[in-house]
Image (tube, rainbow, N blue to C red):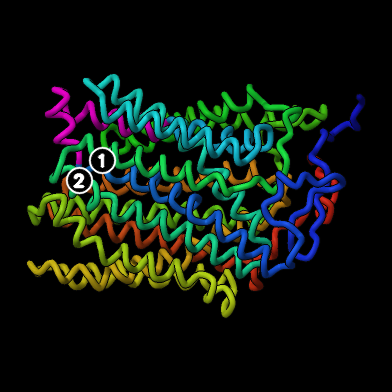
Amino acid sequence: MAFQRGTWPRRPPVAHDRGNLLPDPEPDPKAALVVDEGGPRRANGASRGVLLPLALSQFICSFAGSNMNVMITDISTDLDTTVKGVQVAITVFLLVMAALMIPGGKLTDKWGRKRCFVIGLAVYGTGAVVSALAPGLGVLILGNSILEGVGTALLIPPVYILTTLLFPETTSRARAFGVVMAMGGIGAAAGPLLGGLITAAISWRAAFVFQALVIAVIIVLSRQVKDPLPADPARSFDIGGALLSAVGLILIVMGILAADDNLWLMLGLLLLGFLVLAWFFLSVRAKERVGVEPLLPTSLFRNRTSNLGLVTQNTQWLVLMGISFTVAAYLQTVRGYDAIQTGVIFTAATLGILASSLAAERLAKRYSQRTLVMTGFVVTICGIGVLLALVSGSPSAWRFTPGLLLIGLGLGVMLTPSVTIVQSSFPEAMQGEISGLSRSVSNLGSSLGTAIAGTILVAGLDRGAYAAALVALAVVGVIGLGAATGLPRGNAPAVPTAASAGPHRPG
């Protein structure tokens, strides 16, 4: 079969009928979760049934990313290793996620979103069991760093793709993403508390058993999740591009994580990573010119709205993880609090994220996505200011509550609209690519937040280093606010169909 130069075979157009996704021309009743019978009201009710497994998946992945920090000492003692060894396991987990998130998103088109989701859950659950039974550091790295990292990269992109496709209207999608992002924020913010409680009450191994049990529940609940679009097994997969993007992202994350150890090593790794990514983009252009489908089409980066949304996502997660790291280090190092006490103090931020994220649907009906993102940054920056003003010179733990609450409210307000803006900027046929890219950008923000905070804290500024780290994070928030001002003033539209978007052609 011959293809026109500069094009590649795409999935058949998908038509929208009364807000429902109906594959055209031959819909598969088993492949469509949202059916036409009963109209939009019934379709929306059916769609809501998938939110629980999707939201729980985001929760457990965020929980796993934050709870390990409070178990480092217990793990190192039990496995007869060093704290540095456990930190290596955490680092390898971040590297695996960074390397595979974009390919994982792309595979959803070839294997199907539901299949990728379930495979990811199975791999992740296996990793949790292996970690719980680990007799030494090597097996822990296999279970936690490799298997859980691979599982996360496979299951997270389908969460965002399915949420986008099953909720075509702005307000309903805002509600859905609000639930998903609320669970993610709770997992990240409450991870240290839950991890500390489980470790103190039972052992660190029980924390991995908890993850495995939650995964088992999600697999059972996922039986009601149906893929609204058919898989395309004939879809090509750019193996060379996947390798180049993986190596480039690994080098960049390694450079970020080296920031608090060796600045020259950091600069060298970052430079090498950017060079490899430049090679990747050159290979993408070369493939597009001869009509071969690349891992990521360059058209993803020509959408100004999506680009600005990605910047806001990166800065949001940078600020969230940076503040979590800084405040947790201050509480345990300066105040002498244990993991459970530290987690209790972070409850204020958790409640703030939960409250504002669950209000996403109501907020989306009243305000534009641009307004919500800008407001979120302003509230978060004010929260950092309040935190600095109240905590300074006071021994009271309650002084942390107002600032952390404001930070949680601000982050919760803007996490959902930022994701909605990015996902809504592209048609169904490109949801795999943009979801993988979006999650990679967010993960890089998380790594940057920890690295920036850690670098400042080891700079020899004594107690003033904690204030300096928070001020630096506030400056990053101002940068995110500046990017948000460039977003369109209207609400993000429903995700365009492949037909309405026209044929996809690489430039």
Q: Nearer the viewer, residue 380 or 472?
A: 380
Q: How many marks?
A: 2
Which amino acid, mark 1? Ala
Which amino acid, mark 2? Ile
Measured Cα–Cα span from mark 1 to mark 2: 6 Å
Q: Nearer the viewer, residue 247 or 200?
A: 200
* Tag 1 near tag 2, CB within 8 Å: yes
Reply yes or no: does residue 173 show up in magenta: no
Is 502 above or below relative to 125? below
Predominant SS along the magenta part? helix
Question: What quarter of the picture does the N terminus occupy?
Answer: top right
Per the image, the residue denoted by label 1 is 207
Per the image, the residue denoted by label 2 is 198
Q: Nearer the viewer, residue 466 or 43?
A: 43
Q: Is residue 160 visible in the rendered structure shown here?
A: yes
Residue 421 drawn at (x, y percent)? 61, 60
Q: Residue at x 25, y 48 (%)?
A: 456
Residue 233 drawn at (x, y percent)? 72, 29
Left/right placement of residue 405 relative to residue 274 reads left
Left/right placement of residue 499 relative to residue 159 reads right
Q: Secondary structure at mark 2?
A: helix
Is 88 above or below relative to 317? above
Q: Secondary structure at mark 1?
A: helix
State the residue lying farthest toward the bottom.
366
Q: Residue at x 65, y 56 (%)?
A: 166
Magenta highlight range: 71-95
